[in-house]
Image: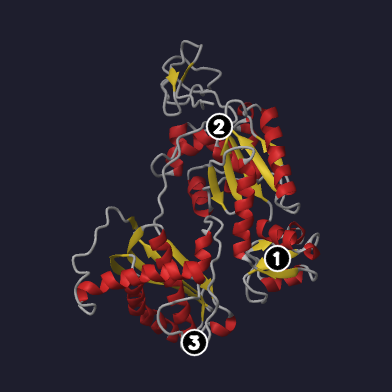
Amino acid sequence: MSRVVPASVTSANSRHATIDPGRATFENDKCAKCEVKPGISNILAFPPRPLRWLFLDLNSYFASVEQQLDPALRGRPVIVAPVDADTTVAIAASVEAKRYGITTGTPVWEARRKCREVLIVPARHQKYVEFHDAIVAEIWKHIPVTHVCSIDEVACRLLDNENTPEIAVALARRIKAGIRAHVGECLTSSVGIAPNRLLAKLASDLQKPDGLVVFTADQLPHRLYGLKLREISGIGAKMERRLAQDGILDIRQLCERRPRDAGTAWGGTNGDRLWYLLHGVELPEKPTQSRTIGHSHVLSPGKRGLEPTRLTARRLALKAASRLRRKGYRSRLLVLHGKFEDDKSNWRASIKLPHTQDSFVILAALDTLFPRLAAAGRLRAGGFRLRMVGVTLCEIEAVEGEQGSLFAALDPDDPLARETRTLSLSRAMDRINEKFGRHAVSVGPLGGGRIDAVGTKIAFGRIPDLDEFHE
């Protein structure tokens, strides 16, 4: 079925010109309906704003997967953590644990204090990806998945025959029931339905767990007035302070501004987009492009010295380089960053790269940076004690029209031929690890004792490919 996205609408009132979700000028007397003064640029009429988006958010996803896999965990307070140690933090909490005030980011020691019966479960990220794929496949049985927003969130655009409240709600209930029946009974979800994706996401957050909330055009924006500014995606502490400086303390005050004035308070290009979105207008989405590829790792308390940190950083660099090649990118900048036990701020340093995707070139750059981290750690009162280390490849660009090297036939030790050979070796290692597992082959000796396990982890905004579990 064809999809209808209205570009403009002409009001029956002769004083209202043709309107689009951009600007319109009202040049006659004050209009009671629009509540604007003569000569003021404002939005005077809206295009039709049917229900266009269904947003599904899985409840307590990692913990729910663990409860699905182990029936002994069901109905009990559970947190998922990198390891079962008081020094780490929860990366997910079950619905039962949240009733005790335990949330993502709660230290394990604090979770035990809040609930003596809480169970700590080590994370199994590959299982979360497998369940994610099964859930997306189930949703596809009911409606196409337009965007996979994170490991536990998807957005689906409604067709013209799906966008009445009754039909959209019935569709949401079928999807929720299908996930429970065909993927796992512990996997509940909250669904939001609205005229645009931002509002659908906001609606999905309002009723948890197992909720279903609909925002229709006639309810906007006044139904949002009871919410806090920080509940809107994109408004953090810094933006909240910026809006407050301009006299905007809540959603009502933002929506009652003219769109241009609201945009000025927001700042930046297209700052008035949020005003239109809160009124239910669907705007074209801005294209996004991956700018960095990287990994970080929280070191266990016994592995926070200099050599374990160095070996862990090398492993992270190799994982990032492998992802870089698999996605067809090259990088021009390497960033090494970390966080010491006695400091909440991040330490970081960077070095330029020769536009590469070669593991050996990236490792050589890392070896150049690491002495700076070592020197910073030695200056601390307790000596080198690094809690977290990360490696990020920045300024990445797609590899397009790659051609063979003119120096490939030279002696392998010739500087002109070396990178050609080492890049070929890096790609060969990718193929071996994909076939035989991520520990099949690596670069360099792992002397200095066993390092922390650096497996693939899930950032909520990025779902790793299953191939990454072989890197």
Specify the label residue 381 is tagged with. 3
**Residue at coordinates 53% horizontally, 44% vertically from top-left?**
147
When the figure is inspected, residue 355 is found, relative to residue 212, above or below; the finding is: below
- In the rendered image, the residue lying farthest to the bottom is 448
SS for dot 2: loop
Residue 346 in sight in this render: no
Rendered location of residue 49, percent (x, y): 56, 27
453 lies left or right of 115 = left
SS for dot 3: loop
Please tell me which residue lies in front, 249 or 211. Answer: 211
Q: Which residue is mark 2?
A: 280
Specify the label residue 79 is tagged with. 1
**Residue at coordinates 43% horizontally, 18% vertically from top-left?**
18
**Residue type pointed to by label 3:** Ala
- Disc 1 to disc 3, how far (Cα)? 34 Å
Q: Around disc 3, counting alpha carbons within 10 Å, would you say few (fewer than 14), some (14 to 19), or many (20 or more)?
A: few
When the figure is inspected, residue 202 is found, relative to residue 15, above or below; the finding is: below
55 lies left or right of 414 = right
Rendered location of residue 433, percent (x, y): 47, 70
Earlier sequence position, callout 1 versus callout 3: 1
- Disc 3 to disc 2, how far (Cα)? 55 Å
Earlier sequence position, callout 1 versus callout 2: 1
Please count the marks in the image.
3
Quarter holding residue 427: bottom left
Query: Mark 1 or mark 3: which is in front?
Result: 1
Rendered location of residue 235, percent (x, y): 53, 48
Quarter holding residue 298: bottom right
When the figure is inspected, residue 468 is found, relative to residue 381, above or below; the finding is: above
Quarter holding residue 301: bottom right
- Disc 1 to disc 2, how far (Cα)? 37 Å
**Residue type pointed to by label 2:** Gly
